[in-house]
Image (spheres, rainbow, N blue to C red):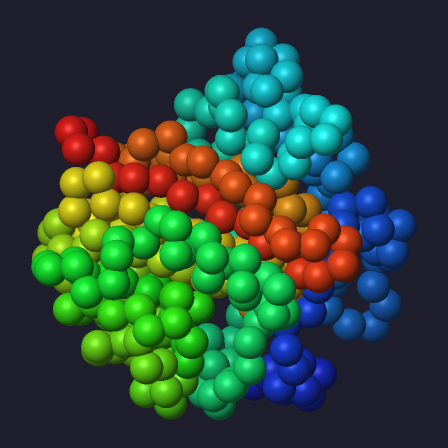
């Protein structure tokens, strides 16, 4: 199979840790109107960082009118002293149809992901305070260690899953892109190497897992609805899906709609995946950032599989 060559700049970026995305306001000031002599830079869209302009556009385009926008925007506007991320999924008036287009899931680097992830990266992709915040969140919501019959799936897994120290279950499956990393992950009882952007089908029976986790990788999914439908299928009734993310990413491989928007926008985007995949309870967004402004932010969007569909 022919492969697309990667420019030298991207080869260098592959070896670095994820970079922090600019806030909407900073990105607006820093983004050039056009790029010279190279690949065209994607247009940056403003979202909750400066209000709700992007949400308004999305809902207006999806609904075909402005009638449904006011009620949606009213629920999305941040209140003083409350995290916008935690508000953005409350009382959402979802557009009738999935509001994003195919180009929203394009990437700056469209070379095969198998090439990008061919070398193991034994680094952490968020800082230590953010890791502790996520691990603490897991300690509160995951089934107790060594619970009989409990099965977990860590999607887009790596050499560490950030579960509580000593956490064990009868079955913890990791799915990722690099076998060397997955072999190093001691919490896993088994692993599968699979590119979900090529094949979003999960190789498991219906109603298999109690919990599915995904750490700082939901922004790389180019077929998110297909993946979330599969997660819904393999979860047990009332099973929990936990998507966590920060503002760091390998920006050349993150989808366009992610790199052009901000933190609260990302929560709405992930929430939309749950909603439009179907079969999930209304998603909830939680801001678990340990030291706002001083360390990496950390956010969680989670939902449970409906017991009756």
Task: Find residue 49 and report its horizontal and vertical position in percent.
Answer: 75, 39
Query: In screen coordinates, is 32 left or right of 102?
Result: right
- Residue 20 visible: yes
Q: Residue at x 60, y 38 (%)?
A: 85
Query: In screen coordinates, is 27 left or right of 152?
Result: right
Query: In screen coordinates, is 220 left or right of 7?
Result: left
Q: Residue at x 57, y 35 (%)?
A: 86
> Vertically, is 275 above or below 246?
above
Task: Find residue 142 and report its horizontal and vertical position in percent.
Answer: 32, 54
Task: Find residue 10 and report its horizontal and vertical position in percent.
Answer: 65, 81
Nearer to us in this view, 230 or 286 = 286
Screen quadrant of the C terminus: top left
Task: Find residue 267 and report its horizontal and vertical position in percent.
Answer: 54, 42
> Vertically, is 263 above or below 195?
above
Screen quadrant of the N terminus: bottom left
> Vertically, is 228 above or below 221?
above
Q: Quadrant of residue 251?
A: bottom right
Residue furthest to the top in view is 67
Total labels: the figure holds 0
Nearer to us in this view, 7 or 241 = 241
Query: In screen coordinates, is 104 left or right of 243?
Result: right
Q: Residue at x 46, y 61 (%)?
A: 135
- Residue 218 visible: no
Q: Residue at x 29, y 39 (%)?
A: 304
């Amino acid at each position: 199979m022919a492969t697309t060559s990667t420019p030298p700049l991207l080869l260098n970026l592959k070896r670095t840790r994820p970079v922090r995305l600019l806030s909407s306001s900073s990105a607006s000031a820093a983004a050039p109107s056009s790029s010279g002599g190279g690949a065209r830079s994607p247009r940056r869209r403003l979202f909750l960082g400066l209000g709700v302009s992007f949400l308004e556009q999305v809902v207006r385009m999806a609904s075909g009118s402005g009638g449904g926008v006011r009620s949606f925007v009213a629920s999305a506007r941040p209140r003083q002293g409350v995290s916008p991320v935690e508000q953005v999924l409350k009382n959402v008036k979802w557009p009738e149809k999935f509001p994003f287009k195919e180009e929203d899931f394009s990437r700056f680097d469209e070379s095969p992901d198998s090439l990008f992830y061919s070398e193991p990266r034994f680094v952490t992709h968020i800082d230590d305070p953010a890791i502790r915040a996520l691990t603490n969140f897991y300690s509160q919501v995951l089934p107790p260690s060594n619970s009989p019959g409990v099965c977990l799936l860590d999607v887009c897994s790596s050499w560490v899953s950030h579960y509580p120290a000593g956490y064990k279950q009868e079955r913890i499956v990791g799915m990722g892109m690099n076998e060397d990393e997955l072999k190093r992950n001691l919490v896993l009882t088994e692993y599968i190497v699979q590119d979900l952007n090529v094949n979003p089908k999960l190789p498991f029976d219906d109603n298999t897992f109690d919990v599915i986790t995904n750490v700082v990788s939901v922004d790389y999914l180019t077929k998110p609805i297909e993946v979330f439908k599969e997660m819904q299928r393999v979860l047990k009734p009332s099973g929990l899906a936990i998507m966590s993310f920060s503002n760091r990413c390998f920006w050349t491989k993150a989808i366009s709609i992610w790199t052009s928007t901000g933190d609260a926008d990302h929560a709405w985007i992930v929430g939309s995946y749950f909603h439009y995949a179907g079969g999930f309870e209304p998603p909830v967004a939680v801001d678990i950032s340990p030291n706002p402004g001083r360390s990496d932010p950390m956010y969680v969007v989670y939902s449970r599989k409906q017991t009756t569909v």
